[in-house]
Each structure stands twice: as structure tokens, then as C-alpha cells.
Amino acid sequence: MKLKQFQAQGLMMGVLILAATLASTSSARANVYASNIKLNGGLTNVLAASGDSVTISYILNEAAPLGVTVKILSGNTVVRSLVLPGNDAGALAGLNSVVWDGKDSNSNNVPPGTYSVSITAASSGYTVWTQTTVDETTGTTYLWAGRGIAVDQNTNSVYYGRIFVANSELGQLHDPPYPGDNVGILKLNADGSAADEGILNTNQIGHDWTDNDVSPWKLTVSADDYVYVDDMANGGEVYRWDPTFSSNALLYVLQTNNQPTGAQLSGPAVTGTGTNTQIWMVDSLTNNGVLKWGVTPDGTCAANDKGVAVVGLGTNSNFSAAAVDKHGNIYACQSIIASGDPNPRVFMYRAYDPSTNGNVAQTNAVWAVGANDDNYGGASGIAVDPTGTYVAVAFQGVGTPLPSNGNTTIFYATNGALVTNLDLLLPMDGQPDTEHQDTDCAWDAVGNVYYIDAWYGFWRAFSPPGPNQSTTVAVMNIQVQSQTAPPVITSIAVANGQVTLLFTGAAGDTVGSFAVVNSPVVTGSYSPVPTPNISQVSPGHFSASFPASGAVQFYRIKK
């Protein structure tokens, strides 16, 4: 067990996470899925001649015991299905690959055209919410001071399923440091393996983190594939990168001049794309509630725009986190660290509508839970699953300087009823364990929930119960082209003032596919031979005859 100093400033702040609309064929009960799909090892469209083989690789976040089906489609028509049984190559957790031989289901080469690839993984699932990651101090699930977690839900991105985790304090136990000891953003594939370009971004991204337990803070991924990160070191500033965190992609989105006086902004959450992007934050210090900003054409918040209050506090204490489901309903929680406090801890509000609310922030909750319940102490992060069925809340616990009784709990979004406490499901040597300090939570596009347990120093993924399957469509396509064999002259004959050439081409070529050119010198400029008589001898074999010209000539067949 790893004990860390509880910092009220760094750990009692909240996070605002908005659930993205699910744009795939999966449901909230899905847990196994394919991501990081590549064709011939690349992330771009593939050109292949008719009959060429294509290697299709992908990562499964966990094993698919009911198998995987890889479909090759022409439009909506399935031309070939490759069925890979469970517990065998192609259906195992981690990296898998299968080779498509370029043929249809009748063993014929597919005709030229554009083909897409879909991958469906299926599982018998679990009877209860079940951890699917492994707590390994030397592995990629380890964190020294994890403060934020997010998953790319964009099914139209090659980075779909990528996990981003913020570690905000330098680890002190390992020499050399493990990845999770470093201050910065960890980038992981859906199975927890390191991203292709590397697992870690520290200060080599155009922005310096301050290593003060709140920098970096929370983060989220937008529908147009940008990663937004809150740096709490200076009142809450928001920076944006691409999913690789390249330095030339850095954008300073929400600046200090956008902060209300005295505010400490936690978040961010992002809805919309392009100029319709909205940035959502929680003011966890000066009672401004939930705030929302629009962006200018360059993607930044307008100078001195202090945001619009969407949800106010009413008679409750200060909010620490908030989330919005696909219907616009708003969920909020407040960080209460005093044992036995009578105030509710988690709330649900109807969608904010300025036309009916008179541009006044909402204060009346539809439901509120957690009054006098120390199981819901120190709320730090909240997230709604993409279907709007479940709300996850990460609680750090009650008491100072070191909290106890922390956990991550799942509630029903409709009424706040308890679904399960994830930490109580952990296999802690068969003994109940209440020593947790959970700092943030998130969902992926297929209904798995992720959270950070800062007490033990791990991020974890849990699958919902029940059988399931999920289909992922590759972002890139396979472009099948006709076989294109260059013409080759096989013989030349001259008789009675006529030149006859025999040459080969592709099986699908016709006499109109060719022209004959000549030159008096081999390295000279070649000119078309006027009106040659070209005929097909057999498929792929041709002849051309024409009057001889000059004492010596060199000939070529031009396709």
C-alpha cells in the first residue's frame, strides 16, 4: 500500500465530464471491442492489386471468448467474413492480426473497388461488474499521483479507444522512474499497452507542468479528437493537443483572463466540434457553479469571456464536479469531507434551456442522494456513460489529512439509485477494504468504466455484467485495383517492308490499351508510330504491325 499526503487544494477539487454521443453499433452492456485497427501495419488507406493479400491488425481491450468476426465489405454488402474462434489467435487480449487473401466467399478475387473492414468481438461477459485490468506496480496501470483519466470515444478516429491519464506529482520510490512516476500525460492503447509513439509526454509538448499535485489536472477528449487538459496550477487553464501530444498541436484554449475573479476552474468537458465547441468547467472555490464557454474560429475562448453560469448552487455547498448526458441532463456532486454531514452529495438537474430558464442558472435538483452518508465523501470526479444509463462518481473519502472510505460508485442516472461500489468488488485477499482515495472516473464508447485509485496508485477498468458484442469499423479503406502488368515486347520481325511486334500485357487489357512509339536512337525522343495495326492473339498477348521506317529503329509499347 502506498500512502500519500492528502492535499486539500489538489484533491478536493472537482472535474466536469460530458458524455459523448455514441456513434457505433455497441450498447452500454458491451465490454470487449477492437481498436487501433491497421491495414498492412499502417493507419492510411491501402492500395492493393486484385488478388493481393492484406494484413489486418487490431487490439482487443480484453479477450473475446465468443470469437471475433472480421468482415470485408463493399458498401453495405459483405463480400467475405473471416471467423476467428474464441480462445484462439485473433480473439485474444492485446494485439491480434488476420490476413485477408483478397478473395470473396466463393474464393474469387474481388473486383476493383473500395472495401471497408469491420471487426466484431463477442464475449459471454460477467455476472457482476468486473475489473479487467491488472494492478501491477511495474506496469502501465501504475500511477504515483493520478488526477485525471479520459478515453477517446471517437469511432471515426484511428485513436479510438486510446486512454489518457494525468499524473501530477513526481514518484519517489523507483530509480529509474516507472512511466507512472513521471509528471505528465500517459497515452495507452485500450488494452493498457503503450501508444505507438510512446507512453509518456512530460514537458516536451510545448507546455511545462509544475509538479505540484494539480498540474496536469483533469482531461477529456472531444468528438473531433482533441485532448483538452486542465492545468490547475494557475486557477484552472485549459490547453489542447492532438492525441499524440505533438508540441506543434498545442493550443491555449481557456486563459487566465477567462477566469471569474477568484475562481479555481476544474474540468474540462467539451461538447460540439469546430466553431460549435463548448468548454464546460466547474468553479470549485468561489461558488460560480457550472460554467460554459463558446470558442472563436481559432478554437480559443474569446478574451475576457468569463463564461455563462448553467447550474447554480442554491442552498447546497460548493460543487466539485459535474457531467451532462446525451439528453442534456446535468449531474453534479459536491466534495464533503466532514463525517456525518447532512447535505446530499450527488444531484441530477434537467437540461439547461435559456429560453425557459430566463438565462438564470438552475438550482432545483430532480433528485439528490448521499445525505449523512460517509460512503460519498470527498467527491472528486463524475462521468455519465454514453447511453445515459449510469453515473459514475469517484470519492476520495472523509477526514483529513488522510481520507478514508473512498470509492468509485455507479448510480442509475434516472433516479440516483445505487448500482454498485466498484472498490468493494476488488479481490483484496478476500477481505473487505475501505482504504481507497479515488480521484477521477470516465467511460469508453462501449460502456466500460475507468477510475483512478490514488491510495493504491492505479487506474482500473471495469466491465459491466452481461453478454455482449461490439463492432468497430476501420477508419481507412482497401483500394483494390486491376492487375497492371507493363507491356513487354517478346519478338520483332521485318518482312516485305512491314514490322511485326509481339508483346504481352495484362489479361484484362484490350487493343485500345496500347500505342507503339519509335526512335532512330535508343536514348532518343520517341514518337508515336502512325496507325499501327494492333490485334489480340490471346488474353494478355498482342501483335502490332506497321510499315518500316528508316534503316534502324527502336520500338516501345506504350500503355
Image (tube, rainbow, N blue to C red):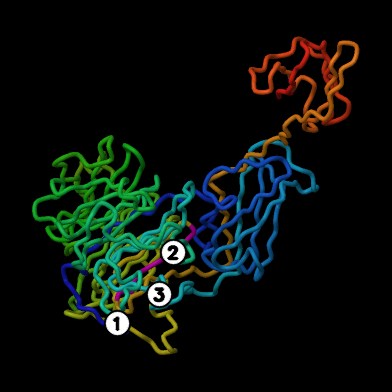
Residue carrying label 1: 2
Quick check: 555 left or right of 278? right
Going from N to C along the chain, the mark reached first, 2 or 3, is 2
Picture residue at 13% right of the left edge, 46% below the top: 257
Residue sitting farthest toward the left: 261
Specify start and end residues of the magenta stretch as a single range: 446-454
- Location of residue 512 (image quadrant): top right
Q: Are marks 1 and 3 in contact (CB under 8 Å)?
A: no
Which residue is under mark 2? 194
Reading the image, the residue beneath label 3 is 422
**Residue 103, horizontal then vertical, whole percent:** 74, 47
Quarter of the figure with the N terminus: bottom left
* Residue 104 spot, x, y in % from top left: 75, 46
Q: What amino acid is labelled 2 in the image?
A: Ala
Judge depth for marks 1 and 2 and give the one in front.
2
Task: Give the answer, above or below, for where 436 lies relative to 75.
Answer: below
N-terminal of the pair, mark 1 or mark 2, is 1
